Amino acid sequence: MIPVLHQTKRSFSLLTISVFVLMMLGAIANGQSAVDRAKILATNEAFYEAFRTGDLDKMHGVWSPSREVGMIPPGRDFLLGINRIMAAFQLMMLRPPEIECQLEAPIEFRDEKAILICDERLGVSDSIRMMNVFAPEKLDGETEWKMIYHGPAGEDNRRT
């Protein structure tokens, strides 16, 4: 059974707290490699490609297999855990959106996490400022960067 997603007026209060916690996680790491940055951007692009094409297997592959993950779909409740996130994407991908990610800032590194802020372009005129957070995972002896959070990057995140 797929859980029903409910719209709530509280969805941004948790976001505000989570953004504050992320911002307080310490100093920006200097010296992250170009390889790390390329892997983060590749994972980010794979996320949006999976979204555009409705590829649930690819979408599952961008999320961390070993960490607690979370997502706040625009206008909806906070989802915690890969099963709830994938159930939400299963519903959203019934009609995959025309979606693009335009990066709005350089990748920011904080305590072994990477934060990416982008404007998600939905169609021609509508966009939403979103935050994607990635963490390194050791997979088959290689370090890969996997998504651990996707959600609004502020309370006033709707753009036109």
Image (cartoon, rainbow, N blue to C red):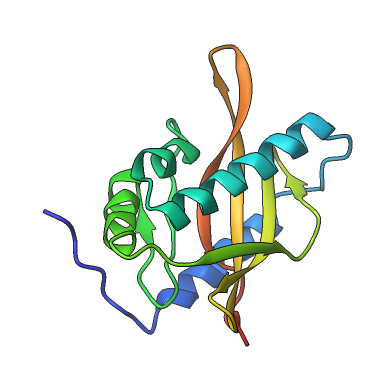
Q: In terms of depth relative to the viewer, which is nearer, 55 or 158?
A: 55
Q: Residue at x 29, y 52 (%)?
A: 84
Q: In the rendered image of this protein, does residue 136 appear above or below residue 126? A: above
Q: In terms of depth relative to the viewer, which is nearer, 16 or 107?
A: 107
Q: In the rendered image of this protein, does residue 113 appear above or below residue 5? A: above
Q: Where is residue 108? Give x, y as percent.
A: 77, 51
Q: In the rendered image of this protein, does residue 128 appear above or below residue 135? A: below
Q: Residue at x 74, y 37 (%)?
A: 38
Q: Residue at x 69, y 64 (%)?
A: 102
Q: Where is residue 144? Give x, y as percent.
A: 61, 28
- Residue 2 image-quadrant placement: bottom left
Q: Where is residue 53? Give x, y as percent.
A: 43, 52
Q: How many marks?
A: 0
Q: In the rendered image of this protein, does residue 133 appear above or below residue 29? A: below
List the single residue furthest toward the right.
31
- Residue 112 image-quadrant placement: top right
List the single residue furthest toward the top.
141
Placement of the C terminus among the 4 image quadrants: bottom right
- Residue 29 image-quadrant placement: top right
Q: Where is residue 97? Give x, y as percent.
A: 43, 67
